[in-house]
Amino acid sequence: MSAAPPPDLVGEIANHPLFAGLDPKLVRSAASTAQEREFAAGDLLAREGTTADTLLLILRGKVALEVGAADRPTLTVQTVGPGEVVGWSWFVPPFRWRFDARAVKPTRAIVLNGPALRETLSRHPAWGFAFLVRFLPLIAERLENTRIQLLDIHAR
């Protein structure tokens, strides 16, 4: 049997906008495999194309979501900060990062175990639905920001 997560970690997850108001049992389950991490400016939190197995809840700092191409400079699609998240690829097969995520300021985040969270959400459909109602708008926003950036590039 695993040890209970630290109460302060549970509280930080429960207060994050993605989890605020969700079932406390879901929050405790997510916290049971979570860890707090610090990233220096310039650190890579995720690399496009690699296995995506985490969801990061940003507590402090700023993270740029970037796409690159061999013939173009890296393009920042969106910058996220406190109260926002990095990572939806852990939820969508084939579970590969679709962006690079780079800290542009010193950043503190809670790193959630994506496969464990997926399993919890699949075992508890009501939790899964409530989570998806919060999570899907984030995915849509990322796709919209990418579309806008691509339109801007082609307009030049």
Image: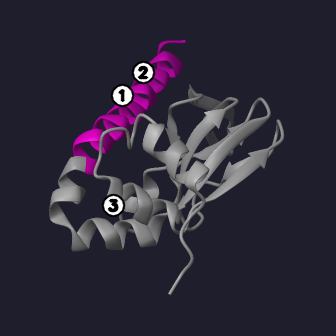
Left or right position of 15 against 74: left
Assess whether mark 2 and mark 1 are in contact (beta carbons under 8 angstroms): yes
**Is 154 covered by the magenta stretch?**
yes
Left or right position of 17 against 153: left
* Outermost residue toward the top in this view: 156
Front-lying residue, 48 or 133: 133
- Disc 1 crowd rating (10 Å Cα; few below 14, some 14-19, many 20+) is few
Q: Tell me the quarter of the picture where residue 124 sits.
A: bottom left
Where is mark 1, residue-wise?
144
Front-lying residue, 136 or 57: 57
- Marks 1/3: CA distance? 33 Å
**Is 146 covered by the magenta stretch?**
yes
Q: Image height check: is 96 above or below 66?
A: below
- What amino acid type should be assigned to the residue bearing mark 1? Glu
- Marks 1/2: CA distance? 6 Å
- What amino acid type should be assigned to the residue bearing mark 2? Ile
- Report the mark closest to the observer, 1 or 2: 1
Where is mark 3, residue-wise?
25
Q: Secondary structure at mark 2?
A: helix
